[in-house]
Amino acid sequence: MLVGLWGVGCWAFLEFCYPYHFFYKEQNQLFVFTWDEWHRYRMEGAGWLARWVGDFLTQFYYYLYAGSLLLTLSLLLLGDVVRRALEGEGVCRVGAVATGMVVMTLEGWRHLWYAYPLWCTVSLLGYALVWWLMTLLPLRKRWLRRCLLPVAFVLAYAWLGLPERGRWRMPEMEVERYLALDNEFYFGHDERVVELATGDGADLAVSGFYYNLANARMGRLPEGLLLKRPVELGTLWRIGPETPVTIIRVMNELYYELGDMTYAERAAMMGCVFTRANRNVRMVKRLAECNLVSGDSAAAEKYLRLLDHTLAYREWAREARRNPLYARKRAFVNRADTLRVGDDARTILTELLDSNAENEVALDYLLCHELVQGNVAMFKLFYDRYCMNRGRPRVCPLYQQALLAWLASNRASRVEMLSYIVDEQQLVDFNAYNAVRGTPAAAKWKNTYWYYFDNIDPPQKTQDPPQL
Amino acid sequence: MMKKYICFIIFCAILCVACTPHPEDVKKSEVLAPVYPDYADVTIPRNIAPLNFLVRGDVDAVEARVECEDYEMVAGGRGNEICFPLDEWRAFMQVATGKKANVTVTARDANTGVWTEYLPFSWHVVADEVDAYLSYRLIEPDYEVFSHLEIRERCVENFEERNLCSYKVVGNRCMNCHTHSVEHPERSMMYVRGEGGGAILNESGVLRKLDIQSPTGSSVYFTFSPSGRYVCFSTNVIIPAFHARSEKRLEVFDAVSDVYVYDLQEERVISSTLLADSMAFETFPAFSPDGKSIYFCSAPRVELPSQIKSLQYSLCRIGFDEGTGSFIERVDTIVKAEGEKGSVCHPRVSPDGRYLLYTVAAYGTFPIWHRESDQRLLDLQTGRVDSLAVVNSDMSDTYHSWSSNSRWFVFASKRDDGLYGKPYFCYIDKHGKAHKPFCLPQKYPSFYDHCLKSFNVPDLGSKRMNFTAEDVAAALK
C-alpha cells in the first residue's frame, strides 16, 4: 500500500511537474537499434550493457507519459529487488521494505538532476539482481555466499560498470521552465511559447529570445517586440568554442528560422559535439533538416539513414524525405558567396535579404535588431532598401513609430512623411506623446517605440540561460 | 541434464540453419548491386581485412558468392549485410592472390520476397601488401570545436582498433597529426595541445615531449627525415571562417605560416629566410626519401579573407643537407599554381622516391572542405602528372599517406556524403597506374552509416606502435 502510494506520488510528480526533463534526456542521446551500435557499446568498456539498456529505455521518453512511467517502474523494480535481496539475507520484511523505499527515494532524487542518466539506475538494478540471485543459491553455509557476493559483483562490473555519482539536489524548477520553453518551441507550439514566456517562464533569461522567435515564426515579431522586457532577440549572441551549450542550441533555432543553413548546421554540429557521447538526436534531426533545405541530399541522407534505425524517429525520417516544407524553405537560404570570420548579425541578415526579399523573418529580425539598439538611422536605411525600394512596405505600429521618429527628427516634408506613414493614428499619438515626453505621464506610451527610445538603454547581452 | 543441454543447442543450431534464407526462383538483373561501401571492381591487397558490405534498398536477405577459379566463399543471411568470417577470408585471399575474384550478390526484396541476382563485380587481389597499421583522429567534421577526441590505431588486416591517445586519459584537449616515420617504423610523433601539451615523440615506445617553438609559433604539419634525426614542420596561425553558402561550409586559412626544420638530437630549430618569407605563406613541408630536399607549398601573401580565392599555393622544393643540418639556399618551383589552375596542398613523396602525390583545390590551404579538391600523382622521373581520374571523386579527396612499399596510399575522402571523411586505399601498380580505391573495411558494414566522426589525417605505418594512451598521459606530466 505504502509502496503503491510512493509509486503514484513519484509518477504524478514526474509527469506533472517534471515532464520536460524527460524530453531533454531523450534528445541528449541517439540510440540506433543495430548490431554495429551494440558493438560500439561493447567497445566502451565496463558498464556497456547497463548503458545499452539505459539508453534503449531512454529513447522512449520521446513519447508522452512514457518518461515518468518508465522511471517510476524502474525505481519500483529497484526497490523491490533490494527488498527481496535483503529478505534473502534474513532481514525482516518491514526492514527490507523500508530499506527498499529508501533506496528508491535516494535514486529517484538523483534523477531530479537533468544530466543523470537512466543507465545508472539500470546498473544499480543489475547489482541488486546479482545480490538477490546470490541469496537464492542453495548454499548451506552463509559465509560462503558472503564470500562469493563480492566476486559476483566484480564479474558483473564488466556489464554494469560503476554508476555515476550524480547529484542529490532539490527539483530544478528553473531548468524545467527553461526546458518547457525550449521544447514547446521545438514542438512548434508557438502560442504556448508566447504564453510561457509571458507567464510562468517570464523571469527566465532566455524567455525573451523564445518569445520573439515564436512571434517571428507567426509573422508577429514587431507587434510583440516591446511587450516583453528586456528585449532579447539573440542577435547579439555569438557562437564560439567558449559559448555555453544552451546558447548554441538556441542559436541553432534562430539561424534555422532565418534561413542561414551554414550557421544552423554549424550550431547543430556543435550541439552534437558538446553532448554526452557526442550524439544528440535533436541535433541530428536538425542536421538532416539543414541539408534537406540546402538541397544537399547526400548529406541529408547520412542523417536520415541514422534516424531510420531509431525506434522513435524512423517515421519522422520517412516523412522528412517527402516533406515539401524543406523545398519551400530552400528559397530563403543565403546565396551570397562570401566568407565570414565572425557572426555579425547585420551581415548575415542583409545577405539573407539580398538573397530573397520575401524572407520576412530575416527582415523583421534585421529591422528589430536596429531598433532595439536604438539605431533608428540604420533601421531607416534598411527599411528603405528592403521595403520601400522593393515596393513592399512593411506596415506595423512599431515600424511606423520608428519611421515617424526619424522623419520628424530629420524634418521630412509632409509628402515624404505621407509616403511612409499610412497609419494616421500614429501621427496623432506621436503628437500626444511629445506633449508629455520626459514627464511621468509619458509612461502611458510605454509600449511605443518613442518611449522605448527615450527611456531604455540599448540592450547588451543579457545573462545566459541555465547552463546544461 | 547435460544431454538435454546438448540436444537443445543442436536444436537451436538446426533451427538457425533452417531459417537462413537461400536464393530461390532468382530473377537476373542487368545492373550492379547497390553495395555499400562501393567495393565493385576494386583492387585490394592480400592482407586486407574482410571486405564486409551491405546492400542498399529494401532488402531483407542477401547472399554473396565470391569465386576465384575453383574456390568459392559464400556469406549472407537475413538482413542486408554481408560479413565474411576472418579465417575463411584469409584462406580465400591466399588462393586469390594475383588473381581476379568474382563477386555475385543476390538479394531478396523485403516487400515482394523476390530474389534478384545482380551483375557480378570483381576484386583484384594483389600480392603487394599495404602497411598493416593505420592511425587517424576521430573528430566531428567541424574543426573549430572539439570534444572527446581520440587518435586511434587500426590494424587493417583485421578489425582490431585501439587508442593511441584519448580524452579519457589526457583530458578534453585537442590532439592531432599522428605521423609515422616511413624509414623507422617504430618512430612516430603527434601533438597534444593545451596546457602542458606539446609534440609527443615516440621512439620504440619511449615517449618524449618536445617543445618545438619557432619565431612564428608552434609546429603543425610535419614529416620525418629519412635518418630520423630531423623533422621538417610548418607553423600556422590558423583562422577558421564560414562560407555564407551552405554547400561550401567551412574554410580555414593561415594568417601566418612558415616552414622550419627541427633537429631532434640537438633540440634546435633550423630556419631559412626562404621558408619564412613575410610576403609569402609556406606550409605542408615533406622530406624527400633521400633526405636531400624538402617539398613544401608556397603562396604569395594576399589580403584575407577578402582575397581568399586568390590564395594559390605552388609546389616548391628546397635542398637540405642532413650531414650539416643546413638548407641549400635555393627554391625550385615544381608545380606552379597557375599551371594547375588551383592551389597545391599536402605533397607526399613515395618512399621509393618515384612519385609525389599532392592535392589541388580551387584555392586556399584547407582542401578537406573543398569539394573540388582532387589528388594528382607526379612522376618525379618523367615529370608526368596523372590526374588520378579513377581515384578522385566529386567530393573532397586529400590527406594521403604512402605505404612503405610505395604500392599503396591511403587518403581521406568525403565521397559518400560530403561531410564525413573516410580512409580509402589506392593501389599504384609497377607501371604507375592507379586502381580504383576501396574504403577501409569494418566489422559491421553499417558502421559508417552510424558513425558521426570523420577519419582525420589517416597515416599508414608498417608496425604497431608500442605505446598506449596511458603512456601519452604519463609523458605529458
Image (cartoon, coloured by chain):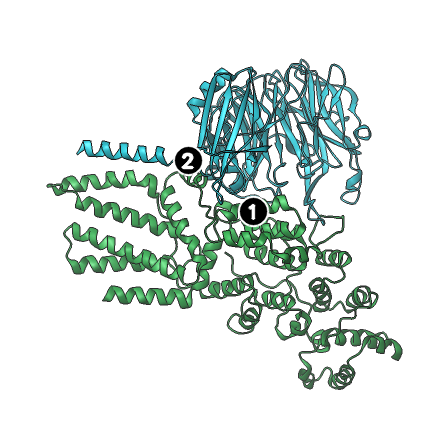
Chain colours: A green, B cyan
Front residue of A342 and B96: B96
**Compared with residue A140, is residue A187 higher up or lower down, i.e. above or below?**
below
Whole-percent x, y for residue A291 in the image: 63, 49
Residues marked 1 and 2 touching at CB (< 8 Å): no
The secondary structure type at the circle numbered 2 is loop
| The image quarter in which residue B312 lies | top right
For the point 63% across and 66% down, which residue is it?
A: A217
Residue behind mark 1: A303
Whole-percent x, y for residue B396 in the image: 67, 35
**Compared with residue A176, is residue B95 higher up or lower down, i.e. above or below?**
above
Q: Name the amino acid type tagged 2.
A: Pro
Question: Callout 1: few (<14), some (14-19), or many (20+) C-alpha neighbours within 10 Å?
Answer: many
Residue behind mark 2: B21
Q: Is residue B38 visible?
A: yes
Disc 1 and disc 2 on one polypeptide chain = no
Relative to A433, is B467 on the left or the right? Answer: left
Relative to A47, is B38 on the left or the right? Answer: right
Q: Name the amino acid type tagged 1.
A: Tyr
Whole-percent x, y for residue B95 in the image: 49, 15
Relative to B277, is B432 on the left or the right? Answer: left
**Compared with residue B410, is residue A190 higher up or lower down, i.e. above or below?**
below
